[in-house]
Amino acid sequence: MSEENNTQTGTKPSEGLFKAFGLPRLIAVFFWFAGIDLIILGKSGIPAVSGWQDFIGHVSVAALVIRTVLGFAFLTFIRFLLRKKEDPGISDSVALFTGSVFFACSALFKTDSFYLTMGVLAVCLVFAVYAAGSFDLSRFEKLCPKTSVAVIALISIALTILICLISVCRHMTYNTACFDMGIFTQMFHSMKQDLSMNTTCERDQVLSHLSIHSSFILYILLPFYAIFPGAKTLVIAQAVLCISGVIPVVLIARKHGFKGLFVIFVSVIYLFNTGLLSPCFFHFHENCFLPPLLMWLMYAVDSRKTLLIYILSVLTCTVKEDAPLYLICIGLFLLADEKSKKRIHGAVIAVLSLIYFVVIMKVLGLSGSADMMMDQRFSNLVFGENTGFAGMVMNIFRNPSYFFSLFFSEKSMLFFLQMMLPLLFLPFVTKKIHRYFLMLPFVIMNLVIGSGYRYAAEMGYHYTFGTACLLIFIVIVNCEDLSEHRNTVITAVAAAALITSVPLLSMNLIHCEEYLKNRDHYDRIEACLASIPEDASVIADTNYLPHVASRKEIYLLNEEDYVSENGWILSINDMNKYDYFVLNKKDGSTQGISAILESSGFTRFAESEGCVVIYKK
C-alpha cells in the first residue's frame, strides 16, 4: 500500500524522505538565486571570492528568505499542476538539474583556476546527476529529430560566431605572434601570389613550409583566402572547420541509438570540449582540419563505408606528417573490432599509413627538418647514436620504466585531468580493450611528447585538436554500452563539458572587451603598420609581424639579430638587409636598437602612441 502511495505522488520508496520535504525544490531555488547573485554583483564589480566580505554585505538576509519562499512556492505550484501526470516530480528534477548547472557556470565565469573548476563541478554534478537519474529520461527521446537538429545548428552557429569574434579581437589587440600567425599569414600570401608556400619568417630565410611540414591540405583554404586575404580569414576558417565536426558527431550519435534531447547532449560534449575550443584561440594551425576529418573518418569506420574511409584517410595524411599516427591507431581499432571480411581494411589503412609516415619523414629529412622536429619533440627519449624514430622506439623497449615515468609528472597529470574531466573519464569505462587503440594518439602526441616538448601537454595549443576527437568518439560508444543508464551518463557528461568550458570562453572575452574599449587606439596602430609599402623588406617585433606579414620578405626580430654585451646593444646583424624596422616601444631592447638605427642613417617613418615605432632605411 505504501509503495502504491509513493507511486501516485511520484516518489520512489528509497527517496521518499528526501522528496517528501521538497528538498530538491529547495536546493534548486537556492542554486538559481545564488547564480543570479553572482551575475548581478559580478557586473557591479564585486567578486564572490576575492571580495567575499563585500559580496556578503550586498546580499540581504530578508531578501534571501523572501525569494527562497516565493521560489519554493512557485515550484510547488508547478508540481501541483502536474499532479495528474505520471511523474509530477519532473518539475523538481528539471529545476534542480538546470539550477545546479546554471550556478556552476555563474560561479566559474571569468575564473582561470582549474582547481576551483574541479571543485565546483564535483559539487554541482552530484545534484545534476541525482536530478537526471530521479525520473525516466526516455520521454525526452521523443523530441522531434528536426527540432534536435535545429537546436544543434543554433548552438553551433552561435558558438562559431563567438569564437570568431574572440579570435579576431585577439588578433586586433596584438595578442598573436610570428609563431604561428605570422608564418601562416605570409604563407597564404605566397600561395595567393604563385601557389608556393614560401616564408621568410619561419627560418629567417626563403623556405617552403612544405620543407618543414607536409601540410598539402592548406591549399583547400586558398580560394577563400584569395577572396578575403588576411589573418582574420584564417582564424575564422579555423573556427568554422572545428565546429563543423559536429555534423558527423550527430550521425555517430544516432547510429549508436541516441535520440531526441540526447543527440543534442552528445553534440554539446563535442562543441564545448575544451580540448577543441582552446586551440581555436591560439593563432591558426593546419591541425584545425583534424576535427572535421577525424570525426567524419570515425563515422565512416563506424558505418563501415569503405570508400569514404579511404578518401578521408588520404585527406588526413595531407594535414601534417604526424597525422598518419591517427590512421595507424584507427586502422588497428577497425582490425580488432571488425569480425567480417572488412577487417582487412583496418590492416591496409594501418600499413599504408605507416609506409607514408616513413616516406614523408625521409623526404622531410632531406632538408634536415625531420631530424630537428624529432629531436625537439622527443628530446627526452633520444640521445647519442640512438636518434630518429627507430632509435626512440628501441629506447622505449630497452627502458619501459623510464618511458612510463614520463606520464606521471605534475604537469602531465594536470593536463590529463584537464582533458579527461570534461569527459568524466568515460574513455576508460569499457571492457573492450581494442578501443584503447584510439587513446594511443593522446598518450603519444600529448603525454609522451609533452613530457619533453611542453606545448604538447598544455591546453591552448593545437596538439589537442586531433586527440580530443578520438576521446569523444570513445565516450559515445562507451555510453551506448551502459544500456539503461546511458541517458543519465550522457546528460552528466554534457553538463560537465558545458561547465568546464565556461572559464575558457569567459576569460577570452577579455580580448573583445579590450578591443571595443580601445578600438580607436588599435585602429591607429593598424593604420601606422599599413603605411609600410607592400614590396618592402621588413623585420618586425613578434606581435606586430602578423599584421605586416602579407609580403614577400618579412623577418622576425629577436635576440639573434643583434649583438649585446652587459645589456647594451652594440650592433645589428645584416642591418642593410631590411628596408623597414618595426619595433615595440614596450620592449626593453627598443631604445638600444633605435639608437643604432638612427646613427646608421635610418629615419623614423611612423609611430603610434608609445606602442610601435617604424624606422625606414
Image (cartoon, helix red, strand yellow):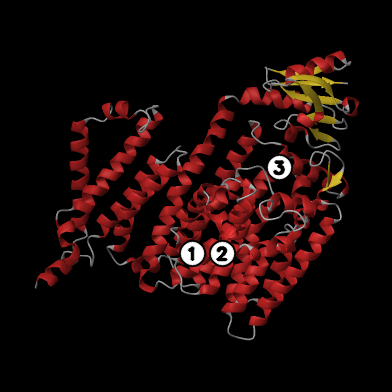
Which numbered marker is on residue 180?
Answer: 3
N-terminal-most mark, 3 or 2 = 3
Spatial distance from mark 3 to mark 2, Cα to Cα?
27 Å
Residue at x-position 71% and y-position 40%? 179
Residue 7 location (% of width, % of height): 17, 69
Residue at x-position 77% and y-position 21%? 565
Which numbered marker is on residue 427?
Answer: 1
Quarter in which the N terminus is drawn:
bottom left
- Which three-letter amino acid code belongs to the residue tagged 3? Asp
Residue 93 falls in image quadrant: bottom left
User: Is 373 or 44 nearer to us in this picture?
Assistant: 373
Disc 3 to disc 2: CB gap under 8 Å: no
Residue 385 location (% of width, % of height): 77, 57
- Which three-letter amino acid code belongs to the residue tagged 1? Pro
- Which three-letter amino acid code belongs to the residue tagged 2? Met
Left/right placement of residue 310 relative to residue 57 reads right
Disc 2 to disc 1: CB gap under 8 Å: yes
Where disc 1 sits, the SS reads helix
Residue 479 higher or lower than 51, as above or below:
below
Residue at x-position 45% and y-position 63%? 426
Q: Which residue is tagged 2?
A: 439
- Is residue 229 visible in this depiction of the protein? no
Spatial distance from mark 2 to mark 1, Cα to Cα?
8 Å
N-terminal-most mark, 1 or 3 = 3
Residue 450 location (% of width, % of height): 61, 51
Exactly how many numbered labels are in the figure?
3
Where disc 3 sits, the SS reads helix
Where disc 2 sits, the SS reads helix
- Comparing labels 1 and 3, the label whose residue is closer to the camera: 1
Which numbered marker is on residue 395?
Answer: none
